[in-house]
Amino acid sequence: MRYGMSEVAVVGVGQTAFTRACGVSIKELCFEAFREALEDAENLQPQDMDGSIICSAPEYDKQRSPAGAIAEYLGLNPKPTFYAEAICASSTTGVRIAYGLIKSGLHDLVAVIGFQKMSELSSTEVQERMGRGADIMWESPFGLSMPAGYALFARAHMQKYGTTEEQLAKIKVKSGKYSVLNHKAIFQREVSLEEILNSRVIAAPLKFYDCCSNADGASCIILASAEKARKITDTPVWIRGLGSASDSLSMANKANLTGLNCAVEAARQAYKMAGIEPKDVDVAEVHDCFTIAELMAYENLGFCKPGEGGKLIEECQTYIDGDIPVNIDGGLLGKGHPIGATGGSQVRTIVLELRGDAGKLQVKGAEIGLVHNIGGVGLYGNVIIFSR
Amino acid sequence: MGFEKFGKISYTSETKVKDFVNYLEKGKIMATQCRMCKKIYFPPRMDCSNCLSVDRMNWREINNEWTLITYTTAHFAPTGFEDDTPYMLAIAESAEGLKLFARLSKDVSEDQVKLGMKLKLTPVKLPNGKIVYEFKPLGE
């Protein structure tokens, strides 16, 4: 096995608990994740940062241009700060930008802070924004929601491959088993197969427990150049490969309805850059906003062949002791999904796993980890590969 | 102005293809075709991403025979659509290879719906002067 050349490492990670209503301001929420990441990075100070990238989905924010407000509160002035957005993939987009800034030599140390306070809006306001997440001219006027978008994939996958509702439910069973071991997860209860299958229909064939929940939360990833990283810590986690792609926003224009083309393409780029194959991955965090999304991720990342995702979960191969452990922190289904914070939370989990710091959720001997973070209904796809 | 009539809730009023709604009100479902490169667009557009021509499109009626690719029954809706639930959302492909997202008519019960079934697109007048299209089984 060979790794691609890497000169960018993660030197610190932090995350707040993901909750239904955090009860604090967005600045305070971000401070908590940032402070934890600084402490994790051997007690770096805010003024050590060369710049910051603030990531969220702006339609949930009351604050106009949140980067300015957050950078001030975190003590990051006068260093540059700006905002990055790719809906649910915002904070891995931030990591990608930080990688470029460091690799170019412009900066040596960059903080990527992702956040979302979805409780800032009423449920009606949240649903109104969700309605505008589709193509507003030709698809939103029919009442398209996120669950309905993924349900269209689920139905097509079932038709083509014989995937069952029970197989999808088994992904949530796994999620519950691990989220109860993650004290930062919103969902602190295991759920039985029967309970999942009998939960109310949201967008057939997806039911209540096939869907992740909205949440408040923040995450922070501190990235450094090689020289800087080695000065800061004995346990840097290196970025070995990055892939990024997009697909149509319109549901009708998606060339593939049984997988996410943006994930396939992002994975291809990331594997090529890292010089590894899917079988080399020891632990993965994938974007399971819905159970079908995790099942398609297995296939799109090459952990199994197209159509065999259902078999992979039935055989428990994505459990902690399986061939390819996936979402061992509970995933979005277990942790909750504070949109802008999610990608950073996935990166944090992989970094802890590769350092051997994941506690009860530790995958033994994990050396190579992968993050798969998707924005919208298969709209933006980011895949990042890490190693010790 | 003009396009705001399209759909129960519309978010767009100004567009170069607002005539689509006028045609729809006359019962016609129209695509555009680039006069330069002949590419057909449905939903219609006036800017050709294939040959980069601008405003060189002809309106033409679609070949109204569609095959159902996938669908869902929504029991949960974005704000403004709550009263409609449950409703079926579908993607279908036309004989010309066009793909479209729209609702499946409430005249069809869910147990009648089968992937691969043939559909046609039909204009539907809504209250308050609004208009939209929906899929119905072909032959009805």
Image: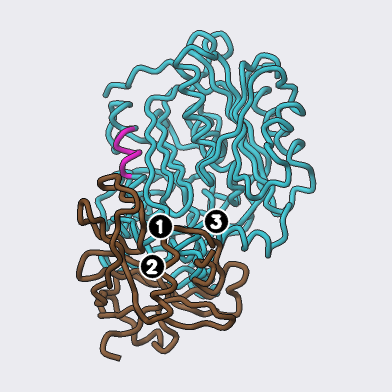
Closer to the chain start, of discs 1 and 3, is 3
Instruction: State the residue at coordinates (72%, 60%).
Output: A122
Which numbered marker is on residue A250? 1
Q: Residues within 10 Å of mark 2 (few under 14, many from 20)?
A: many
Separation of marks 2 and 1 at Cα, in angstroms: 8 Å
Query: Which amino acid does the dot numbered 3 rest on?
Result: Gly
Asked which secondary structure carries label 1, the reply is loop
Q: What range of the chain is rendered magenta?
A: A264-269
Closer to the camera, A110 or A62? Answer: A62
Q: Between marks 1 and 3, how big is the CA–CA gap?
A: 32 Å
Say which amino acid is labelled 2.
Answer: Phe
> Which element type, helix, strand or loop, lies under badge 2?
strand
* Residue annotated with mark 3: A176
Q: Which chain is brown?
A: B
Cβ–Cβ under 8 Å for marks 2 and 1: yes
Quadrant position of residue A26: top right
User: Badge 2 is on which residue?
Assistant: B101
Q: Which residue is nearer to you in this view: A211 or B65?
A: B65
Looking at the image, the residue that sits furthest to the bottom is B140
Q: Nearer the viewer, residue A276 or A314?
A: A276
Badge 3, how many Cα within 10 Å: few under 14, some, many 20+?
Answer: many
Give yes or no for residue A265 being in the magenta stretch. Answer: yes
Image location of residue A145, percent across then percent down: 52, 64
Residue A311 is situated, as x and y percent measured from the top left of the image, at 30, 58
Q: Mark 1 is on which residue type?
A: Ser
